[in-house]
């Protein structure tokens, strides 16, 4: 819950106490990895995510979060590697297309990123982040009418979120 509320320091404190009580409890290392990624402590995040995979080798969320972390580190090959591992476990997991789109977007491969995000939106039609990224890609491709449509769609899904309104 603390992670969803973006209270990462509090989440880490609780999870580390939990880890002391029961070592390698499922999800604890994963959640610690996510929290440390959000705090940009990538060394600790990598450590916890890899521990999760050592203990639970088919944990798709760990592969997806490692892929996302390597995007942050701008290591797109390792990001793709972990995404491929996730896809081996569940080829239609919706986050695979979203992370793939982000990977391609950060590499400025806009057309390929758009294709991946269009697959992601089929699985998560109300994902504001995916919709917003589609808008940004259309803008980069000089498709302003399409960009406007997606920006407005994101704003309508989160009318009280000033971030999307300000970006548009």
Image (spheres, rainbow, N blue to C red):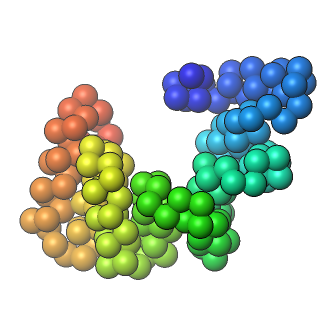
Q: Residue 165 lies in what quarter of the image?
A: top left
Q: Position of residue 126 (x, y in %)?
A: 27, 43
44 displayed left or right of 126: right
Q: Is residue 60 above or below residue 29?
A: below
Q: Is residue 5 above or below residue 70?
A: above
Res. 166 visible in picture = no
For the point 9% across and 65% down, the residue is 145
Q: Position of residue 133 (x, y in %)?
A: 33, 58
For the point 69% across and 54% down, the residue is 58
The one of 56 and 110 positioned closer to us in this rendering: 56
Q: Is residue 48 above or below residue 92?
A: above
28 displayed left or right of 116: right
For the point 15% across and 48% down, the residue is 152
Quarter of the picture containing the N terminus is top right
The one of 38 and 68 positioned closer to us in this rendering: 68
Q: Position of residue 15 (x, y in %)?
A: 76, 26
Res. 48 visible in picture = yes
67 displayed left or right of 119: right
The one of 87 and 132 positioned closer to us in this rendering: 87
Q: Residue 69 lies in what quarter of the image?
A: bottom right
């Amino acid at each position: 819950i603390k992670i969803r509320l973006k209270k990462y320091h509090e989440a880490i404190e609780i999870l580390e106490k939990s880890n002391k009580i029961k070592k390698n409890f499922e999800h604890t290392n994963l959640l610690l990895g996510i929290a440390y990624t959000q705090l940009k402590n990538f060394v600790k995040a990598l450590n916890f995510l890899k521990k999760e995979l050592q203990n639970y080798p088919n944990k798709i969320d760990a592969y997806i979060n490692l892929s996302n972390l390597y995007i942050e580190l701008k290591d797109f090959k390792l990001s793709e590697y972990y995404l491929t591992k996730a896809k081996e476990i569940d080829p239609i997991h919706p986050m695979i297309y979203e992370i793939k789109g982000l990977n391609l977007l950060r590499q400025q491969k806009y057309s390929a990123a758009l294709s991946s995000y269009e697959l992601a939106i089929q699985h998560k039609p109300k994902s504001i982040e995916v919709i917003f990224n589609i808008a940004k890609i259309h803008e980069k491709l000089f498709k302003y009418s399409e960009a406007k449509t997606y920006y407005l769609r994101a704003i309508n899904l989160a009318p009280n979120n000033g971030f999307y309104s300000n970006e548009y």
